[in-house]
Every structure is written in C-alpha cells, then in structure tokens.
Image (cartoon, helix red, strand yellow):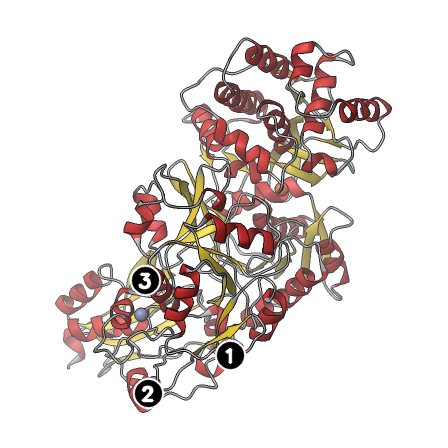
C-alpha cells in the first residue's frame, strides 16, 4: 500500500465499551472494511487509529454504529483526521498501564443469546453447563481478585483451560477470544449439592435435583453470581411462608425470578421500557404492577401492588428456572439485615437453618454484589439499588475533581463512592450499617475498590451525623482530610452530578430523616444549592416522634402527634374515631408523653407525613419494615383524583415551613363525609405536590428560574415524582434520578463532589 492513497482517522468512543468484547469486534469490522491501524482502551473508552482509502474508512466508520456486541453501548463517538501511517495490519494493542487499570474491570454481564442457545443444545459441548460464558457475557467484577482484569487475576485462575477452550480463547475470530472466565464441562467449575448440614448429596444432575426439591416446596440456597440466593416456589403460599418464618422476614416483599419474558407477562404489566430493563445485560429486579390473575402466591409481596421481577442472568439460573417450570422467589441469602452470604462454608453456617438444600460450586465469589433494583417513574427506570450489573461502571462527571475523594455514604442502604478525575464509581450495595458483619463488609468493600481503581483518596467525605458508623470510619482514615456533608445537600448534589448540572439548582430533597446543620433531624427540605454550599429555602413543619424510633415502627403515634398539633389537646370525635383500632390505654399514654414532651424528638421528614396519614386512614398500627405504611399509602391513591387539601406556608419561621395542619383537618372531614380512602390518599399526594410547586415558585421569584432536581427516598414514589414534574414543567427543567439512587444509596456521590468543591473554594 502506498501512503499517497491513504488517509487516517482517529475515532474516540465513549460508553460501555470495555470488557464487553468491543476491541475484537472493532478488529473484525476493520478487517472487513479493509482498513489497518490499531484499537486500544483508554481512560474514557476506546480509541481507534484507522488507515485506508476514503471508501474503506467510510465503510469502517459506518460499521461502528451498528450491530454492536450485545453488552456494548456507545454514548459518544468523535472522529478526526490524522496523518496517514503505513501500517500493514489492524491490531489490538495494550494501553498505557495506568489508564488500562482504572477501567479494566467491567460489571458482570447477563448470559448472551448465543451462550443461552448453546446450553440447551444437546449436541453442543456446553449443553447444560452452568458456567458457560463468552466475551459478550459472564462474570466480571464479582470474580476479579486484582487488576488488570485477566484470568490470572480472577477466581478462575485455578482452573486450567482445556485445549479446546484454550483455542477459543486465543482465536480473534472466536466469540470467546480473551473471555477471561472461559470454561467448559471438562475444565471449568462444577456444581455440587449438599444438605442443610453440608453433607454432599449424590445425584445425576444437581440442577434437576434442586428443581425437584423446589417443586416439592423446599427451600434451596443457590450460589449465584454475587452471592447466595434463597429460592423457593413462588406459586406456593406454604413454601413462601416457610421461607418467611425461617428468614425472620414478616412482610417485606420478595423478588421473583421468571424463566423469560413470556413468563414475566403472566405476573406483571410490562411496557417497552420495562422490557428493555428486564432483558438488559444488567438484568436488575424491576418493580412492576402485578397482574391480578397471576399465579404468584399473595404472601410474596403482601399488600403490595408492585412485584419485583427479574429474568435469569446466568446459565445456572436459566437451567434451574427451566427445570422448575414456575416462577421462583429469589431473595438474598441472609438472615434479615446481615450482608448476603457468598462463601460456601459461610453460607452453610449462616443459612443452614433456612435452606433444606444447597447448590454449591467451586468458582469463588470474590466480591459480594446484591441484585440491583429498578423502579419505574414517569415511564423511566430509576435505580433504587445500584449493585450487580452496574458496579463498577463509572458515572461521568461535569468536571474534573482536584483530588481523589471517597464518599462514605450514610447509615441505611449504604453504598460508598470513589471519585477521581471526571468519573465516579459507586461500590456495591452494602446495606444498613447497623451490625458488625455489615461494617466489615463495608470496610473491605472500600479497600478493594480503591485497589481495583488505584485510587488513594486524599479526602474522605462523610455524613454530618456524628454517630453514624460511616462517620466514624471517615474520621479513622489517617492521612486524609475528613469533610462533613449535610445529608440533604448530598442528595441534591448527587442529582446535580448525575445530570452534570453546575448549579445553582433548587433541590427538592424529601426523605425520612437526615442530620441538619442545627443538630436537629431534617427530612423535607427545599434547598438552593451549588456544589459547595446551600441555603435552606423551605422545610416541613416538624412532627413529634413519640417514643423516638418506635414511632417509625408504629406510625399511628406520629398520626396522633400530628392530630394534637392540628386540633390542640381536645381532639374531635371524628378524629379520634380513626384510632379505634388502637387500645385506648395506649392512646392516653402517648397523649401524656406528647404533652410532657418526653422522648419526643422532632422530625421533618416527608416520609413521616406519609407514614402518619397512611397509618390513620389505612388503620395501620405497625409497620413491619421502614417505609411500609408510606408505600401502602402511596399505592392506595386513586390516579383519577386531582383535588388537593389546603396547606399554608409559614414564612415567619426562621426557615419557611410547609404546614399541613389544615390538610389533616380537611382529610379527616373528607373521610367523615364518606370519601373513600383512595381519594383521601390521592388528595394527600396532590397536596404535597402543590405545596412543593408553590415553594419552588416562591423561591424562583427571588433566585431566578434555575433548574429543579427532585431527590431523596420519597422520589422512588412514582406518583410524587410524576406530580412534581407535571406541576413545574415546562416553566422549570425538572431532573429526576435514573442511574444514581434517589434514596440514601445515592448520597455518597454528592458527598464526594461537595467535599471537593468545599476544598476548592477554600
Ligand atoms: Zn455469551
Ligand atoms: Zn474447557
Ligand atoms: Fe436521605
């Protein structure tokens, strides 16, 4: 080839293009188009230098947007001319070590169609092989032991590839070219079956045997991708009840795994976006409206109109679901609030009292990673737990941080987040930092992600709450600057970061609780925020939590406090009648407690208002998990009701307060006049929406029409999110979360960005 006829192009591609078979795919496209050059990973994605005549280059560039490898996603593609080089071939080249490292470990990928076909083909050598994978699919993050990501640095290192697998791995034309976990029945990991005491159970086919046990109503502990699941027949009320009582989980919903989309359609209502999410390579649990005629036992998600559904994401799950022939409950293998079990011995020890049978294997899980959970809000998926399938995929930031930062997260649903350069990496879901095991998982998780990403944080950002374990952890980090960040500010900046907003924004941060700068508990906050600072524009009138945290488990106590606040000490009969389900002795004692202000911390959480109204009108005495009453109150709302109740905004308070006392009186009168609970619930939601919109408009009159972000756990509530957006658009751009959880699982990102901004402004 003479250089006179050829031209050069540099093509930079950003997106999910690493660890997903993208470079071999580019290689094949290059050969097909007849161009030479090279492809390499760089810090942001993939960079290609291509050389050839104009026609060939045109063919090549055109090919790069179509028929991508299944797990790849292109966010941005830029193409510039570069001087031609006389190179003879197209090559996949290694990258600069530092850059390669930081991006080398991709998230775990659900089984691709090609592999799925192989495992059900009796003529294929991987027929029914549960560890089948290829460059387009399979375990990644959960098996990585070190960096850079290659076989020696995974828990597959101990399995030596057989000749056939080795050939696949070495051949650039093969789907398994450089598939690090490549394996087959001859050389790869194997399943074993054990009873509850860990004794091995002899059988011809482990998964067929496990499926049979499940069909008979037994509970099977299953070693999956990021940890153990507990599986049982989701159509059997008895099996589900057995699992609930053994796991000590009263009413909290279980997720269900179904064999395929057709089976999913029988349980839940699926729109296009839900279908996309269910079949995505990330394969999250998606919360969807249940179908009335569904075969799912009612105690899988009692009192809940949404069902968490996912499709199989490993060959093991696919085979089991096919064998079982019915939907299965798939819940984390743990006892109530402990971290998910992920080692064979650990699982036998911890789950022996729950499971009848164990499906084990000899491919170790290096990093535990729970299933991710997505809620549908305004027709869009919102991650409410970001873990398996998403971690450690980075989130692109608006600008570069001045030094690496660790965001430590909060207390509940903890995740941590590392920020360096212009990227942020969330760690896997850790859970509620309330016991020793969880704390250990937290510390270990941070150390590992820092090592994988080669990030040594100079700054450690933590919640303002002085007593959180995450706060203590941050302060214990020697050599790093610890910066305290207010909880709701962190929520707002997480949303800003996700949408690459510079600020100022009006941040609507509604959740249950968060420590305020005045030492009291905040919870329904409207902030004017930049990355470095915030001003409180409005909050909610505080409510008294009689008995402290007990009031969260027994939300009727909050309802009573609200009522005393709304009517004064002499409650009208209409109002008191709503407490008919609570023993009058208890009512009297709480009224005394409220009057004397004994152990009645004040709270401003919007979540508490949901709890209180729900407890009152649904006649709920206790919640078996945090937020249960709020959730039921939300689901009770009739979408057709558009009226709201009256509210006021008390501008004389130091921070203007949204006052819902009149709304409560209206609601009680409404119910007394015969309004159905569904209408009261809807009017309550509409009231919160209208109050929020009115606060935002008042603020905008002073600060200008800046973008609005809606964040905090309450915005998992689709009705609230949709309402706020509809009330403010199109005058305001209203941003909701998508990839970053609106709840406390998302605050670590905001913490990190804020800490950096504070240090830069000093
Ligand atoms: Zn595959
Ligand atoms: Zn093999
Ligand atoms: Fe929060």
Q: Alpha-carbon neighbours of circle 1 within 10 Å: few (<14), some, or many (≥20)?
A: some
- Pick the residue in front: 43 or 134: 134
Secondary structure found at label 1:
loop
Q: CA distance from mark 2 to mark 1?
A: 31 Å
Q: Which residue is mark 2?
A: 166
Q: Which is nearer the N-term, disc 2 or disc 1?
A: 2
How far from the left and from the top, in percent, is residue 64?
A: 24, 63
How far from the left and from the top, in percent, is residue 117?
A: 25, 68
Q: Is residue 46 above or below residue 497?
A: below
Q: Which is nearer the N-term, disc 3 or disc 2?
A: 2
For the residues carrying marks 1 and 3, which lies nearer the camera in this image? 1
Mark yes or no: residue 507 visible: no
Q: Is residue 698 above or below residue 535?
A: above
Q: Tell me the number on the disc at residue 599.
A: none
* Residue 196 sits in quarter: bottom right
The answer to whether residue 243 is left or right of residue 325 is: right
Image quarter in which the N terminus is found: bottom left
Q: Tell me the number on the disc at residue 200.
A: 1
Within 8 Å of ligand 2, the CB of disc 2?
yes
Q: CA distance from mark 3 to mark 2?
A: 30 Å
For the residues labelled 1 and 3, say whether their Cβ atoms are less than 8 Å apart: no
Secondary structure found at label 3:
helix
Q: Alpha-carbon neighbours of circle 3 within 10 Å: few (<14), some, or many (≥20)?
A: some
Q: Which is nearer the N-term, disc 1 or disc 3?
A: 1
For the residues carrying marks 2 and 1, which lies nearer the camera in this image? 1
How far from the left and from the top, in percent, is residue 90?
A: 25, 79
Residue shown at 39% from the left, 79% from the top = 94
For the residues carrying marks 3 and 2, which lies nearer the camera in this image? 3
Q: Tell me the number on the disc at residue 322.
A: 3
The answer to whether residue 28 is left or right of residue 683 is: left
Q: Is residue 759 above or below residue 726?
A: below
């Amino acid at each position: 080839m003479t250089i006179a006829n050829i031209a050069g192009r540099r093509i930079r591609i950003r997106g999910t293009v690493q660890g997903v078979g993208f470079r071999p795919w580019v290689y094949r496209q290059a050969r097909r188009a007849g161009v030479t050059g090279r492809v390499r990973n760089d810090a942001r994605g993939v960079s290609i230098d291509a050389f050839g005549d104009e026609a060939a280059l045109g063919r090549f560039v055109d090919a790069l947007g179509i028929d991508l490898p299944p797990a790849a996603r292109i966010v941005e593609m830029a193409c510039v001319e570069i001087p031609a080089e006389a190179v003879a071939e197209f090559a996949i080249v290694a990258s600069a070590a530092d850059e390669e490292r930081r991006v080398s470990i991709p998230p775990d990928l659900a089984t691709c169609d090609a592999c799925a076909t192989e495992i059900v083909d009796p003529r294929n050598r991987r027929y029914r092989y549960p560890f089948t994978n290829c460059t387009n699919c399979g375990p990644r993050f959960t098996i990585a032991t070190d960096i850079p990501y290659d076989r020696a640095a995974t828990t597959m290192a101990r399995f030596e590839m057989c000749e056939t697998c080795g050939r696949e791995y070495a051949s650039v034309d093969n789907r398994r070219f450089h598939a690090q976990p490549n394996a087959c029945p001859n050389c790869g990991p194997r399943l074993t079956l054990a009873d509850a005491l860990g004794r091995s159970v002899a059988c011809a086919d482990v998964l067929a045997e496990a499926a049979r046990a499940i069909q008979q109503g037994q509970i099977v502990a299953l070693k999956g991708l990021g940890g153990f699941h507990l599986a049982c027949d989701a159509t059997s009320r008895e099996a589900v009840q057995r699992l609930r009582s053994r796991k000590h989980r009263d009413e909290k919903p279980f997720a269900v795994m179904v064999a395929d989309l057709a089976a999913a359609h029988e349980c839940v209502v699926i729109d296009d976006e839900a279908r996309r999410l269910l079949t995505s390579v990330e394969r999250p649990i998606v919360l969807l409206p249940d179908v009335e005629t569904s075969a799912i036992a009612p105690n899988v998600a009692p009192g809940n109109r949404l069902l968490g559904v996912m499709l199989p994401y490993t060959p093991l799950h696919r085979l089991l679901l096919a064998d079982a022939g019915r939907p299965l409950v798939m819940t984390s293998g743990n006892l109530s609030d402990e971290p998910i079990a992920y080692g064979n011995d650990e699982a036998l020890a911890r789950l022996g009292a729950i499971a009848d049978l164990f499906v084990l294997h000899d491919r170790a899980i290096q990093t535990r990673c729970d299933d991710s959970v997505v809620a549908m809000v305004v027709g869009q998926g919102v991650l409410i737990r970001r873990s398996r399938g998403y971690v450690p995929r980075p989130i692109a930031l608006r600008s570069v941080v001045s030094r690496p930062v660790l965001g430590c997260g909060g207390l509940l649903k903890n995740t941590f987040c590392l920020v360096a350069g212009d990227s942020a990496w969330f760690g896997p879901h850790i859970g509620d930092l309330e016991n020793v095991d969880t704390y250990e998982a937290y510390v270990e998780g941070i150390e590992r992600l820092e090592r994988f990403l080669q990030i040594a944080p100079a700054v450690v950002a933590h919640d303002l709450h002085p007593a959180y374990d995450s706060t203590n952890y941050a302060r214990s980090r020697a050599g790093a600057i610890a910066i305290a960040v207010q909880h709701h500010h962190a929520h707002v900046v997480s949303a800003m970061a996700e949408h690459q907003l510079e600020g100022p924004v009006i941040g609507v941060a509604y959740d249950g609780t968060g420590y305020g700068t005045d030492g009291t508990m905040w919870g329904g906050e409207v902030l004017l925020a930049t990355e470095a600072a915030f001003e409180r524009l409005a909050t909610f009138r505080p409510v008294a939590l009689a008995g402290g945290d007990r009031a969260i488990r027994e939300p009727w106590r909050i309802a009573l406090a609200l009522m005393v606040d709304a009517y004064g000490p002499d409650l009208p009969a209409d109002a008191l009648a709503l407490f008919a389900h609570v023993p009058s002795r208890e009512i009297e004692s709480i009224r005394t407690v409220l009057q004397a202000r004994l152990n009645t911390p004040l709270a401003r959480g919007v979540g508490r208002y949901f709890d209180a109204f729900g407890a009152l009108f649904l006649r709920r005495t206790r919640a078996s998990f945090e937020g249960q009453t709020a959730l039921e109150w939300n689901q009770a709302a009739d979408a057709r009701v558009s009226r709201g109740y009256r509210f006021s905004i008390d501008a004389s308070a130091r921070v203007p307060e949204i006052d819902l006392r009149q709304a409560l009186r209206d609601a009680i009168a409404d119910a007394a006049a015969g309004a159905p609970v569904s209408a009261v619930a809807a009017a309550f939601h509409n009231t919160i929406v209208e109050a929020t919109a009115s606060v935002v408009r008042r603020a905008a009159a002073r600060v200008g029409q800046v973008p609005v972000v809606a964040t905090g756990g309450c915005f998992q509530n689709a009705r609230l999110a949709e309402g706020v957006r509809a009330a403010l658009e199109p005058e305001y751009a209203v941003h909701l979360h998508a990839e970053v959880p609106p709840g406390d699982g998302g605050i670590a990102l905001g913490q990190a960005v804020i800490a950096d901004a504070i240090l830069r402004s000093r």
